Amino acid sequence: MSRKLSHLIATRKSKTIVVTVLLVYSLLSFHLSNKRLLSQFYPSKNDYKQTRLPTTSHSQDINLKKQSAVNKKENQLHNLRDQLSFAFPYDAQAPIPQRVWQTWKVSTDNKDFPSTFRAYQKTWADSSSPHYQYSLIPDDSIIPFLENLYAPVPVVVQAFKLMPKNILKADFLRYLLLFARGGVYSDMDTMLLKPIDSWPSQNESWLHNIIDVNKPIPYKNLKASPLSSDKISQQPGLVIGIEADPDRDDWSVWYARRIQFCQWTIQAKPGHPILRELILNITATTLMSVQDPGVPVSEMIDPRYEEDYNVNYRHKRRDDETYKHSELKNNKNVDGSDIMNWTGPGIFSDIIFEYMNNVLRHNSDIMLVNPNLNKSDEEGSDGASALAEEFDGGALSKSTRRFYKKISESLQSSNLMPWEFFSFLKDPVIVDDVMVLPITSFSPDVGQMGSQSSDDKMAFVKHMFGGTWKDDADKNAGHK
């Protein structure tokens, strides 16, 4: 009996040693691979400080969908957009990785992990799917993790370290995780209501059905058929939800954008070009907007578009003559508007619209599907009046069809995606490989803007709104 026990212990020790060796070998191989890639980009250790930071606001001459560094020589990749494309190539045909990402100050086994979050966290860790890999990254692991993950593009890690507020880092981190590894990111104050595999993005029959029932919407540059067996069968590359759709005259008092996409829950394939443009924008904005960036920023940017990189010129503040546009940011003067337009839903929404307009302008086979624009026989030819407002279950609801004429004119005359395309959504919308879910999907029970209850078939994640970052940031900067 003792001989068998000794043999069993020896066998377990051997397995443990083998697993440990393999893990160390994998980490070492990953590190050496990144180091070789880094040496291809930068022959000298400090050459990365000469990385060029192209603006994301002036990309008229570039097809962002097909922008790739694959055919360029590695040692000529001094443009951050090219470096990101080369280090994290996008495969539109690949499935969405079965990963779930969350971050918090401490790990779940730490006594300081908030008890109120444990129930939320378990919905993601235990109930998402047995096939999903769940990862919670605590604060003390973030920098080592990013230094390994983004070793080929160290200027991105440099920007992350320079950010003066933790909320900026938290926003930036979610984009970095999804761009490099893909999967689902969701804030700690969210609850998963339905398994991820039941979401429309994962449901091939739903994708086929939406194409069969709804004709693709034409736009000016459309020439080739946007439908193919590949497009119908493949999962979307980016899945986002509506955060705000305020149909009121004073919407700008309460929200950053008329249509605002939420970023507390995002699903993506690694390397998606929208995330690439977002990371490029945030990196450049950080280096240009903070004190002592540690790199020669003036040599890295295009001087013609210097204001594009400065967060003080974003959105409403651009035309505010009383604002100190030259004032650099630190941990004492960052406010809610800065956060919204630096890393938050403001810049997130802007980059998404800029990307969509770019691909419509440069491609002739973009698929646009919007079931919310379907017209009935009773409607007029422009679809704008008869069903603009209708009663649904006793409550007054509004329809995307109110904007049918404007949407059609904008797409067919200018190749521009209007915000109205995403207003009053009840069903998901597809723009190329981007799926936009209605407000109910990630914001049920908010009691406004058409959001339905958590029991609705389109409710997948519930946001508990536990964050107070904007109030804290405004108090920090001395605002009411």
Image: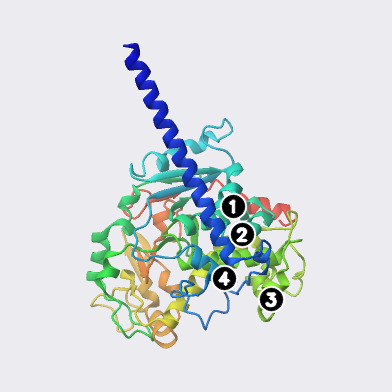
* Residue at image mark 1: 147
Residue 477 screen position, x and y as percent: 73, 56
Is disc 4 placed on a helix, strand or loop? helix
Which is nearer the N-term, disc 3 or disc 2? 2
Disc marking residue 75: 4
* Residue at image mark 2: 154
Which is nearer the N-term, disc 4 or disc 1? 4
- The answer, for residue 370, to whether it is visible in the render is yes
Residue 39 screen position, x and y as percent: 59, 62
Q: How crowded is mark 3: few (under 14 residues within 10 Å), some or many (20 or more)?
A: few
- The answer, for residue 246, to whether it is visible in the render is no
Distance, label 1 to label 2, CA atoms, is 7 Å
Is disc 1 placed on a helix, strand or loop? helix
Amino acid found under the numbered disc labelled 3: Glu
438 vs 29: above or below: below
The one nearer the camera, 82 or 416, is 82
Distance, label 3 to label 2, CA atoms, is 22 Å
Q: Residues within 10 Å of mark 2 (few under 14, many from 20)?
A: some
Q: Do the residues labelled 3 and 2 touch (CB within 8 Å)?
A: no
352 vs 144: above or below: below
Amino acid found under the numbered disc labelled 1: Glu
Is disc 2 placed on a helix, strand or loop? helix
Q: How crowded is mark 1: few (under 14 residues within 10 Å), some or many (20 or more)?
A: some
Which is nearer the N-term, disc 1 or disc 2? 1
Residue at 69% across / 76% down in the picture? 306
Q: Are marks 1 and 2 in contact (CB under 8 Å)?
A: yes
* Residue at image mark 3: 306
